[in-house]
Image (tube, rainbow, N blue to C red):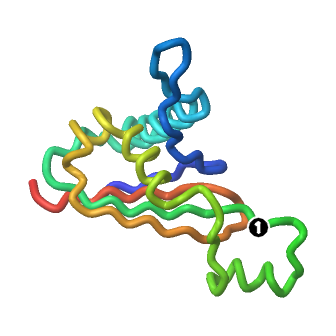
Amino acid sequence: MRTFKIPGMVQAKQRPRLSRGRVYTPQATVNYEGYVKWCYSDYANRMGWTPIEGAIRAEIGVFMPIPKSDSKKKRALKISGQIRPTVKPDADNIAKSVLDALNGLAYADDKQIVECEVKKYYGEEPCVYVKLIELEG
């Protein structure tokens, strides 16, 4: 099992764009995926992780910032998990962004992901926790 943290606000995978007859990935997506790779590499170097070879379960926990305009009561409900974020980015686009970034680094190919769970919460600081569990060797 491998768990690591990606500090900061999550960036969902954006759709490819077409300009002047060529398709490209938006810069915000490229930057975020590079940041995810850097965060994972930092953990992998310290822990001695090598790429996972078998089937993988991915668990992604996203912590969104609480709006400053919320009352203390509403803020407390959000921190306790009684109110969950139903705002963008979408859970599927978050998973795509994070898992695509780890492709070729944490595992050979994202086809190895056989289970994926994304949970969104409110938190004191925005961040993403990723847990990769090898199901078979």
> Position of 34 compared to 79: left or right?
left
Residue 36, image x and y in percent? 49, 39
Residue 92, image x and y in percent? 44, 57
Quarter of the figure with the N terminus: bottom left
Which residue shows up at 54% across the image and 35% down it?
29
Quarter of the figure with the C terminus: bottom left
- The part of the image, by quadrant, that contains residue 32 is top right
View extreme (top): residue: 20
Q: Which residue position holds label 1?
A: 66
Give amino acid for label 1: Ile
Residue 55, image x and y in percent? 16, 55
Mark 1 lies on a secondary structure that is: loop
View extreme (left): residue: 137
Which residue shows up at 73% across the image and 66% down it?
124
> Position of 76 compared to 16: left or right?
right
Using a 10 Å C-alpha cutoff, classify the residue at mark 1 as few (fewer than 14 neighbours), some (14 to 19) or many (20 or more).
Answer: some
Residue nearest the viewer, comparing 31 with 8: 31
Position of residue 38 relative to residue 128, above or below, is above
Which residue shows up at 50% across the image and 43% down it?
13
Position of residue 50 relative to residue 127, above or below, is above
- The part of the image, by quadrant, that contains residue 48 is top left
